[in-house]
Image (cartoon, rainbow, N blue to C red):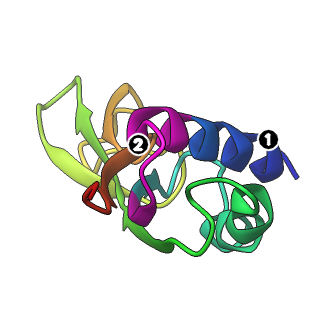
Amino acid sequence: MHELGITRSIVAIVCEQARGAKVLRVTLEIGKLSAVMPDAVRFCFDVCAKGTPAEGAELEIIEVPGRAICRGCGGEMALAEPYGRCPCGSSSLELIAGEELKIKEMEVAECA
């Protein structure tokens, strides 16, 4: 379960960027081809955020579908796995989406 380490890193980055302000919401983008399980990140987030400015923050996860461009014909296609074959027969594919894991945005409380 590498999601625990990933989630610790996410919380550390969020807290660093918040510079001590209370974190209200965090939005992540997780690609379906990234080998990161969103449910595991959700499970780990509250544990990792405990005692930090991110404790109690809402976590939103946007799952990004896999997409590739065929180097043979230039066609674009959806991928459910990090490999595949184009309808033209080529297996030379360039992944263009689905491997990301990023903090898309975060919301922090205004300082008084």
Amino acid residing under circle 2: Ala
Q: In this rendering, is residue 107 above or below 11?
A: below
Name the residue: 25% across, 59% down. Answer: 110
Marks 2 and 1, the one that precedes in the sequence = 1
Residue 35 image position (x, y, % from top left) = 66, 49
Q: In this rendering, is residue 49 above or below 25?
A: above
Left or right: 110, with 52 as reference point: left
Name the residue: 54% across, 53% down. Answer: 81
Decide whether residue 26 is among the magenta residues: yes
What element does badge 1 sit on? helix
Left or right: 110, with 50 as reference point: left
Residue 40 image position (x, y, % from top left) = 74, 67
Q: CA distance from mark 2 to mark 1?
A: 20 Å
Left or right: 82, with 97 as reference point: right
The residue that disc 1 covers is 5
Q: Is residue 83 visible?
A: no
Name the residue: 61% across, 47% down. Answer: 11
The residue that disc 2 covers is 18
Amino acid residing under circle 1: Gly
Q: Is residue 24 visible?
A: yes
